[in-house]
Image (spheres, helix red, strand yellow):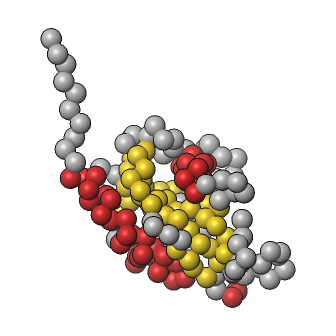
C-alpha cells in the first residue's frame, strides 16, 4: 500500500538472539545485506504483517520468537532518484516503516528460506547489534539508526530477565 505522500507502508524486523546479536540477511543474488522487511497488505495491521513477513522471509512463527515491541511511529526513508520507478502508479518515492524487535526463542536451525516460492534472502548471520549501521545502504541509514536506538532498551530489558525456571513438585 502506498500512501498519499508516495510512501509504501512496510514493516521491518530486527531479530535478536540470546547474546544480543541481530540477524543480518543477504538478498538473493546480490551482495546487499539488510534486516528483513516487507510491505503491509491492504486491510492488514502492521503486527499481522510482521508475523506474515517473519514466516515468508525467515520461516519462523510466533512459536519460535517473542515480539518485544515496536517503534512508536512510522520511520521514513526516501529512495534515491535512480531507484524511483517513475512509470508506475501510484508513484512510490520511499518507504514508511514500523520496526519490530523480536527475540529468537527457538533455535538457529529454525531459520529457513525455503518456505517461500521466491525467497528474498540466501544467507544470514548473527552480527553485533550496531554492526548494521556500518553496512546498510546509505539511504536507509537514518531509519536503521533510529530503530536500533529506540528498540535497544527492549532487548536490554529482555536480557536482564532471569531465565524461566520450571519447578517440579513431588
Residue placed farthest to the bottom in the image?
81
User: Is residue 66 positioned above or below 29 on the image?
Assistant: above
On the picture, is 144 further left or further right than 115? left
User: Looking at this view, is 124 or 41 the one in front?
Assistant: 41
Q: Position of residue 67 (x, y in %)?
A: 43, 50
User: Is residue 59 positioned above or below 160 on the image?
Assistant: above
Q: Position of residue 151 (x, y in %)?
A: 37, 65
- Do we see residue 19 in this rendering? no
Instruction: Report the residue at 19% width, 19% height from top.
Output: 168
On the picture, is 115 further left or further right than 132? right
Instruction: Report the residue at 77% width, 78% height from top.
Output: 91
From the image, which quarter does the C terminus lie in? top left
Tally of marks: 0
- Do we see residue 91 in this rendering? yes
Q: Position of residue 33 (x, y in %)?
A: 51, 68
From the image, which quarter does the N terminus lie in? bottom right
Q: Position of residue 135 (x, y in %)?
A: 44, 75
Residue placed farthest to the top in the image?
170
The picture quadrant where one finds residue 92 is bottom right
User: Is residue 94 positioned above or below 106 on the image?
Assistant: below
Instruction: Report the residue at 47% width, 79% height from top.
Output: 141
Instruction: Report the residue at 58% width, 50% height from top.
Output: 48
User: Looking at this view, is 28 or 74 the one in front?
Assistant: 74
Amino acid at each position: 500500500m502506498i500512501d498519499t505522500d508516495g510512501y509504501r507502508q512496510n514493516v521491518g524486523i530486527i531479530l535478536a538472539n540470546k547474546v544480543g546479536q541481530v540477524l543480518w540477511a543477504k538478498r538473493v543474488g546480490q551482495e546487499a545485506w539488510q534486516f528483513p522487511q516487507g510491505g503491509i497488505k491492504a486491510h492488514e495491521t502492521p503486527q499481522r504483517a510482521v508475523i506474515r513477513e517473519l514466516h515468508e522471509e525467515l520461516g519462523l512463527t510466533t512459536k519460535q520468537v517473542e515480539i518485544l515491541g515496536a517503534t512508536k511511529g512510522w520511520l521514513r526513508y526516501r529512495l534515491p532518484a535512480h531507484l524511483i520507478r517513475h512509470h508506475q502508479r501510484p508513484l512510490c518515492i520511499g518507504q514508511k516503516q514500523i520496526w519490530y524487535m523480536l527475540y529468537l526463542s527457538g533455535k538457529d536451525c529454525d531459520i529457513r528460506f525455503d518456505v517461500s516460492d521466491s525467497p528474498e534472502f540466501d544467507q544470514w548471520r548473527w552480527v553485533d547489534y550496531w554492526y548494521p549501521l556500518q553496512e546498510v545502504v546509505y539511504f536507509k541509514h537514518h531509519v536503521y539508526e533510529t530503530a536500533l536506538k529506540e528498540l535497544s532498551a527492549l532487548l536490554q530489558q529482555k536480557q536482564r530477565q532471569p531465565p524461566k525456571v520450571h519447578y517440579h513438585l513431588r
